[in-house]
Image (cartoon, helix red, strand yellow):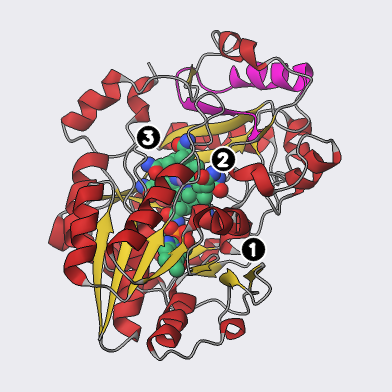
Amino acid sequence: MCKIALVSANTYKMPYPVYPLGVSYLAAYLKKNISDCSIEIFDFNLNSFEEYANFLRLHNFDIVGISLRNIDDTNIFAQNDFIIHYKKVVSATRQNCNAHVIIGGSGFSVFPEQVFAALEPDYAVNGEGEESFRRLILALKSNNIKKEHIDSLVYRNSNGDIQINRRKEYISFPTLHLDNCLAEFYWDKSGMLNIQTKRGCPYKCIYCSYPVIDGCSVRTLDADTVVANIEELYHSKRVNYLFFTDSIFNICNEYNRELARKLIASNVKIKWGAYFSPGNLTREDLELYQQSGLTHIEFGSDSFSDSLLEKYGKHFRFSQIIEQSNNCWQLGILYAHFLILGGYGETEATLNETFENTKKLEPNSTVIFPYVGMRIYPRTKLYEIALGEGVIKDDRELINPTYYVSKDVDIKTLEARTVNTGQKWIFPNEEPSPLIERFRAKKRRGPLWEYLRF
Ligand code: B12
């Protein structure tokens, strides 16, 4: 019998606590594919360090897998960084049991070398976790570990250097089963649960780490299994609002149509939201998705200036942003735009264009969330640019929040300039709205930013 603990180390609760989905995918896959193993889950959003110590001492685990979702808050004004907390989690693990300590997660996979060096686990997995973690567990269990043979394994080699194995393949059938107790907590606190429909992102936005985490080849998850998971959530836990956590939902549109049709046929009445791109989308598709429950869209628009969209490496232009905004408005689908102000190539002229173009959207129709500056991630084009311009020296310090801010704009004046644009802008430094808190307390479901529009 192999005793495994899966630990979600995340304690960040903005914009709401997020169900640790990666942990659930891992738990379901390991249960299905390792005979004779037991799995316990621990979540730092629900429990304290004292409870963690008791949990470890009680179970005498062979393996503790720690999931690191966020490294920082990507908020240039606050710059919260979570590495100190993760160090405490690893050291509490070492103090209270003799298990092998393995780390992974999306945050870890953005900075695998840097986080490995900061936390010194025994091993780690870069990116998709299921199969690599399974192989690692079996190797550790049989005391016969051939490190080079495990895809995406991260470890110190015989010279003491950090080694990251290449990934040769991805799994075909991820399995999911949400943990009952966690699902209840997050459904209550967040008004939403989450599920994936695909992995990977084919786009090449200059700053983005999504292809680094999930790969650029897109793998759709079996539509019947996704619908079966949703039916289970709906019937056994009465969960009827979901966020599809795909990097971008509207890629592989054939698949999306199939999924939407199956959702409609399934008779579960769920509402759902997702990240969308304003490109590669038709009104007919939006209508179909709406019939299947689509209620809100978070558009990764980035800018309302065409020349800047080109610099950011985006595959769509403002005409598509306005077209999809109008479609959503007419169909009654709630939508928000996420922008990056002051990133690579931003000038006073492109900023003015963004503020002027905002006025072309239907008044009071949307909420705009501007990030300020671009968080610099290793293995991206922005990283090369920042290195070339001398903004950074190398990638070692990047786990400390590091931003690229265009020298041609003054970020202090941004907020004031949004005042007469006809839409509600919410900057990252704004306090959480009491309005949202009130609606959450009344158990309203969904992201709830729609209440901030007026
Ligand atoms: C969807 C999403 C959101 C949604 C979540 C909605 C919801 N209801 O779920 C929203 C918009 C709310 C959101 C918010 C935030 N997000 Co976000 N989000 C994502 C996104 C796109 C997907 C995350 C996800 O669910 N993946 C699906 C699950 C199944 O995959 P996974 O968790 O990665 O797990 C797999 C592997 O990592 C691995 N694994 C996981 N754990 C472990 C453990 C072990 C031991 C092993 C071996 C393997 C392993 O195996 C799993 C299965 O294959 C990622 C980017 C990405 N493409 O990953 C960013 C991402 C996680 N977010 C990020 C950030 C920063 C945030 C915010 C802090 C931003 C903000 N300022 O608001 C908040 C924090 C929210 C919170 N309370 O924690 C960053 C984290 C990196 C960083 N800089 O720290 C990411 C990576 C994006 C980026 N910029 O690169 N986010």
User: In this rendering, is residue 218 above or below 370?
Assistant: below
CA–CA distance between discs 1 and 2?
A: 17 Å
Residue 368: % across, % down: 51, 26
Kindly tell me whether mark 3's CB lies below 8 Å from ligand 1.
yes
In the visual, does 316 lie left or right of 69?
right
Span highlighted in magenta in the image:
347-374
Q: Nearer the viewer, residue 5 or 272?
A: 5
Q: What residue sits right under mark 1 in the picture?
A: 216
Residue ID at (58%, 78%): 151
Report the disc number at residue 15.
3
CA–CA distance between discs 3 and 2?
A: 17 Å
| Amino acid found under the numbered disc labelled 3 | Pro
Report the disc number at residue 300.
2
| Amino acid found under the numbered disc labelled 2 | Gly
Determine crowd level at label 1: few under 14, some 14-19, many 20+ residues with C-alpha closer than 10 A: some
Residue 129: % across, % down: 47, 70
Callouts 3 and 1 close, C-beta under 8 Å = no
Tell which circle, 3 or 2, labels the residue nearer the N-terminal end.
3
Residue ID at (25%, 88%): 36
| Amino acid found under the numbered disc labelled 1 | Cys
